Amino acid sequence: MLMVTMIVGVITVAATLVTRMPGAVGKSLRLPDQITLPDGTAPQAFTQGGTWYAVITTNDHILIYSRATGALLQDIAIKLAATGP
């Protein structure tokens, strides 16, 4: 009985997501054709918004670019607090 309840629950959640967000299905943001990073940096992660995209580098910087022009808008250095005893 628990298995049937779980299956019905998963189907209900999936159906709710599909019916509540019909416009979102298939409308993903496009990836840029290419990204020019500053010398000496290597990408570690990527994220994007409506008008911008960001690259997190291996040297602890977040580089924010304009989606329209590809220009570097902001370079944020990540400074982590010291941890441990």
Image (cartoon, rainbow, N blue to C red):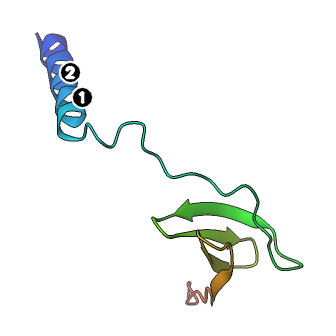
Residue 57, x across and y down, in percent? 72, 72
55 vs 76: above or below: above
Figure quadrant of residue 79: bottom right
The residue beneath circle 1 is 14
10 Å crowding of disc 1: few (<14), some (14-19), many (20+): few
Q: Which mark is residue 11?
A: 2
In what element is the residue under mark 2?
helix
In what element is the residue under mark 1?
helix
10 Å crowding of disc 2: few (<14), some (14-19), many (20+): few
* Marks 2 and 1 close (CB-CB < 8 Å): yes
29 vs 73: above or below: above
x 26%, y 36%: residue:
22
Q: Furthest residue to the right?
A: 39
Q: Is 38 situated left or right of 63 in this image?
A: right
Q: Which mark is residue 26?
A: none
Whole-Å distance between the Cαs marked 2 and 1? 5 Å
Residue 62, x across and y down, in percent? 63, 78
Question: Considering depth in this image, is 37 or 70 the residue closer to the camera?
Answer: 70
The quadrant the N terminus occupies is: top left
